Amino acid sequence: MTDIAIIGGGPAGLSAAIYAASLGAKVTLVDDGLELGGQLIKQTHKFFGSEKQFAGIRGIEIAKKMIQDIKEYDNLEVIANATVTGYYEDEVITIVQGVNGDILKKLKAKRIIVATGASENILPFVNNDLPGVYAAGAVQTLMNLYGVVPGNNILMVGAGNIGLIVSYQLLQAGIKVEAIVEALPRIGGYLVHASKIRRLGVPIYTSHTLKEAYGTDCVEKAVISEINQNFEFIPGTEKELEVDTICLAVGLSPLSDLLWQAGCQMKYVPELCGHVALRDDNMKTTKDKIYIAGDVAGIEEASSAMLEGQIAGLNAAISLGYKCDNYQEQDRKLKEELKELRDNPLSEEIRRGVEKALIKEGWD
Amino acid sequence: MRIKKHPILEFNQKEKIKFTLDGKELEGYKGEPIASALIAAGIKVLSRSIKYKRPRGFFCAIGKCSACLMKVNGVPNIRTCVTKLEEGMKVEIQKGKGDFN
């Protein structure tokens, strides 16, 4: 039995765990990665956003600090390298652990915070199952965490922030990036990232997408093509690229399986990149004892995930009767900070999405 | 291949250890994922699709996509992207859905 079970040890889950534990709640954090920290542990770039949420600091450093912080609490237990496989009535979760997945545990909690993050999207193209086609996060894991060269010559698909940042990280690791293709007529990510990459001689083809990959047992060639406004291939515009690796940075989807299973009310919100649980401003879902935080609540970034984690951690602990000096003030501060973080033209879609997923007071 | 020089990161690799892939001896670092050691050794095909035997390689790195399921120390369907490499591990490309023989 634990007070608060937190599922996922990325930026949202770690923040929630630290906050709730600091108020005295008994917290159990379950994470399925080889190491704690989620995507943070491979982010070598410095963060934008609010100073309180570590702007100017590299993701890897933020992760180190939070992983250090959780060690300070005796009331915070971590179950690492373990997958939560199911939710049962009365806040019971099942956990599969062990190298062979042969340890099955049950855990009962008074509150659950789901901070499971997201999984990367795949793109339909001919031979998209060939070895050498990697998701962008997987490429980051290989090179930034384990120092392994994912390939010698890369085609990046997607010029959003992830596509741009991972391209830059590939170049930093001394790996050749042949080109970046982006289906939209414009670059989706921050232009500062795009210019850095262009200066290093990597072309970014907008209104282009990947059509086919070729190779016997792994990628040996890729064919890209220009597309029109309706995203249809324009015949005769194909280009062949000699690449051995295709890196897909074509978006993420919330990993919301547990929330579906728990019976939380879900809604498809395109601005948040998929189905998300409806939530109030405390990050509580339509199930009274289940909270959400981070990418599972809508694809955004680590800074907002950390704030959502803190809001969920604080409010879950308060709902169990734990005391916080000037709770109202703390709660208001966190929510205001989150609002400020989203208060820029680039977050317009996020703001619209959050509005659609929000349960207002008096709602039923 | 391993990254040798990096402007931000240092890879203080721990202990070098030996393991085998289908009987062939390979080297990797203790504690890294099995799949990462295989890719560093130049192995790209980690499994075959069940029906058409199409090659499958590393894809998601978070234990979700099932493209890296392999037989490890006789146990099939091990997610090699989230399983740590240990000295003397016997890694095999499994046949079909895998078995314990």
Image (cartoon, grey):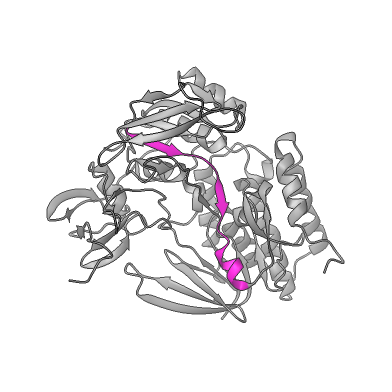
The relative height of residue A70 versus residue B14 in the rendered view (above or below) is: below
Where does the image place residue A302, in percent across and percent down from the top left? 60, 47
Residue A326 seen: no
Where does the image place residue A69, in percent across and percent down from the top left? 55, 57
The relative height of residue A19 versus residue A339 in the rendered view (above or below) is: below
At 25% across and 39% down in the image, what residue appears?
A216
- Image quadrant occupied by the C terminus of chain A: bottom right
Where does the image place residue B57, in percent across and percent down from the top left? 32, 48
Q: Seen in the image, is A131 located left or right of residue A90?
A: left
Which of A303 and B99 lies nearest the eye of the viewer?
B99
At 46% across and 73% down in the image, what residue appears?
A95
Q: Residue B68: name its quadrant.
A: bottom left
Give the residues drawn in magenta, as a range.
Answer: A244-262
> Is residue A257 located in the magenta-colored stretch of the structure?
yes
Q: Seen in the image, is B34 located left or right of residue A317?
A: left
Residue A68 seen: yes
Which residue is most to the front? Answer: A235
- Image quadrant occupied by the N terminus of chain A: bottom right
Where does the image place residue B28, in percent across and percent down from the top left? 23, 49
